[in-house]
Image (cartoon, rainbow, N blue to C red):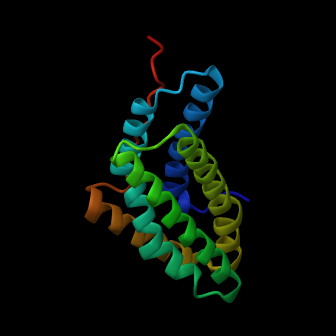
Amino acid sequence: MQRDQSLIPLSQQHHDALALCVYIERAEKTGHLDLAHWNREVLAAWQSEIRWHFQAEEEVVFPAAQRFESLRPLVAELLAEHAELRRAFAGAEAGQLTASDLLRFRQTLTAHVRKEERQLFEQMQGEIPAAGLAAIGRELDEFFQRHTGGLACAIRHPQPQSHT
């Protein structure tokens, strides 16, 4: 199903989060997982984009979805995943993500993004009429304008680690 225009800014941010996960996966496969580097990258992703993304979902998208009984269990799962991911971001802020923490973070974030895209957004588009989706889009635009000064977060692509 094609993504509704109102949800595209969040889908673009999901793409950025998945890019971070791909870079972590590639670093792991090379056997050169510089934990100091990845603690900084995970923290930078949180500070520049993901914290606003989570807040926008929690203030705008999830309440809209919870109006539908069929979406409530999924929203509860996503909120629990936000809490788990916030703990990982706090670990990165403290510079304490271990290799296993980082890999678990990558797996959790990847699964979370896919769940939102493939389940939440798809089901919302099936349940919420076009006018309701447009209202969500306006609320998201207002949220990002208020908090980040733009219609969505600034795109910040993760940087691969150097092998020196």
Residue 113 versus residue 28 in the image, above or below: below
Outermost residue to the right: 1
Residue shown at 66% from the left, 54% from the top: 111
On the image, the x and y values in percent for residue 152 come to 38, 54
In the picture, residue 117 is in which quadrant? bottom right
In the rendered image, is residue 6 in sight? no
Left/right of residue 66 with respect to residue 146 in the rendered view? right
Residue 21 versus residue 129 in the image, above or below: above
On the image, the x and y values in percent for residue 28 come to 61, 29
Residue shown at 34% from the left, 48% from the top: 93
Left/right of residue 117 with respect to residue 20 in the rendered view? right
Which is nearer the eye, 15 or 111? Answer: 111
On the image, the x and y values in percent for residue 129 come to 63, 80
Give the position of the C terminus as an image quadrant.
top left
Residue shown at 51% from the left, 64% from the top: 82
Outermost residue to the top: 164
Number of marks in the rendered image? 0
Residue shown at 41% from the left, 50% from the top: 91
Give the position of the N terminus as an image quadrant.
bottom right
On the image, the x and y values in percent for residue 92 come to 40, 46
In the rendered image, is residue 111 in sight? yes
Which is nearer the eye, 10 or 76? Answer: 76
